[in-house]
Amino acid sequence: MNKKYERYINYIVNDIEKPYFHNMVEMYGLSEKEYELILSKVFNQPVTIEGNRVYDNDGNGIYFETSNGYWVKKEYDTNGNITYSETSNGDWVKHEYDTNDNEIYSEYGDGYWKKYEYDANGNTIYFEDSDGVIRDYRHE
């Protein structure tokens, strides 16, 4: 890649906003061949593109976009659990997991949250949420 083209690509990577596919065509006039190069840099990892979907090396869907500009972005931990997702509607959710891949905490963009605890067999023994619901089975 020549230096001028590389500077142009880096400019796009630093400037582009979601919806990525729409903007790559409308704002920059890029070809589909350039999508993978740009989005690999945007997501800071090698990606595969199938239609309007972007996948990481593990086959996890990390980005999806519709023709009307709606998009969904997801992040994963090393075990393939979704740790963060957001949409063009402004909705988002964060997830945390224990070493057994059980969800232990979720927080949503609207302020709602929930916590879980599990026994050695993976059964829920404690639940609490921001609405004040508590289910405690730890002492049974």
Image: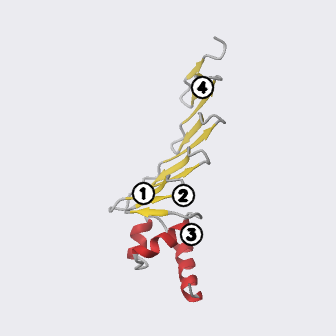
Residue displayed at 60% across by 29% down: 116
Q: Which numbered disc, 1 or 2, marks the residue that appears first in the sequence?
A: 2
How packed is label 2: few (under 14 Cα within 10 Å), some, or many (20 or more)?
A: few
* Mark with earlier residue (3, 2): 3
91 lies above or below 126: below
The residue indicated by pointer 4 is 122
Residue 82, position as x, y percentages in the image: 54, 45
Disc 2 from disc 4: Cα separation: 29 Å
CA gap between label 1 and label 4 equals: 32 Å
Which marked residue is nearer to the observer: mark 2 or mark 4? 2
Mark 2 or mark 4: whose residue is earlier in sequence: 2
> Which label's residue is closer to the chain start, 1 or 4?
1
Furthest toward the top, the residue is 140
> What percent of the width, then of the height, locates residue 88?
43, 56
Marking on residue 64: 1
Give the numbered dot on residue 26: none
- Confirm or deny contact between disc 1 and disc 4 (CB under 8 A): no
Residue tagged 2: 57
* Residue type for callout 4: Gly
Q: Which residue occupies the foreground of this view, 5 or 57?
A: 57
Residue that numbered label 3 is attached to: 41
Three-letter amino acid code of the residue under disc 3: Lys
